[in-house]
Image (tube, rainbow, N blue to C red):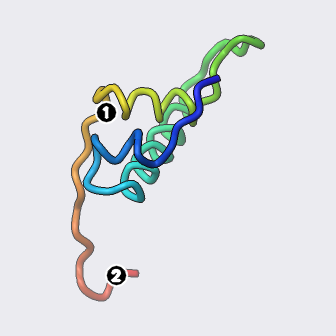
Amino acid sequence: MRVFTPDDVKDRAANKYLGVLVAAKQARMLNEFPRERSSREKKLTTRSLEELAEGNIEYRVVARRRGEE
């Protein structure tokens, strides 16, 4: 299993924190789809970090409206 550091994903995102948040959001989205589970399948978080590091995830940052928490 490949180990991802924040430096691996910061090149594809504005900073390392945003990179981790984008990968986590992608993993949650992937978890909603049905799939066959096997013992060799990569974890969704690892798969999302790989996709982000390779530049396969496109995202945009949407500013919150005032008063929204």
What is the three-letter code of the residue carrying label 2?
Glu
Q: Say left or right for 24 vs 54.
A: right
At 23% across and 78% down in the image, what residue appears? 65
Q: Position of residue 24 (x, y in %)?
A: 50, 46
Residue 12 image-quadrant placement: top left
Q: Position of residue 7 (x, y in %)?
A: 41, 46
Mark 2 lies on residue: 68
At 26% across and 44% down in the image, what residue appears? 59
* Residue at the limit of the structure toward the right, as seen here: 39
Give the label, 2 or 1, closer to the camera: 1
Q: Nearer the viewer, residue 64 or 34?
A: 64
What is the three-letter code of the residue carrying label 1?
Ile
Q: Is residue 59 above or below residue 51?
A: below
Quadrant the C terminus occupies: bottom left
Residue 14 image-quadrant placement: bottom left
Q: Which of the marked residues, 2 or 1, is nearer the chain's N terminus? A: 1
Q: Say left or right for 13 vs 45.
A: left
For disc 1, the neighbor class at 10 Å (few under 14, some 14 to 19, many from 20) is: some
Quadrant the N terminus occupies: top right
Mark 1 lies on residue: 57
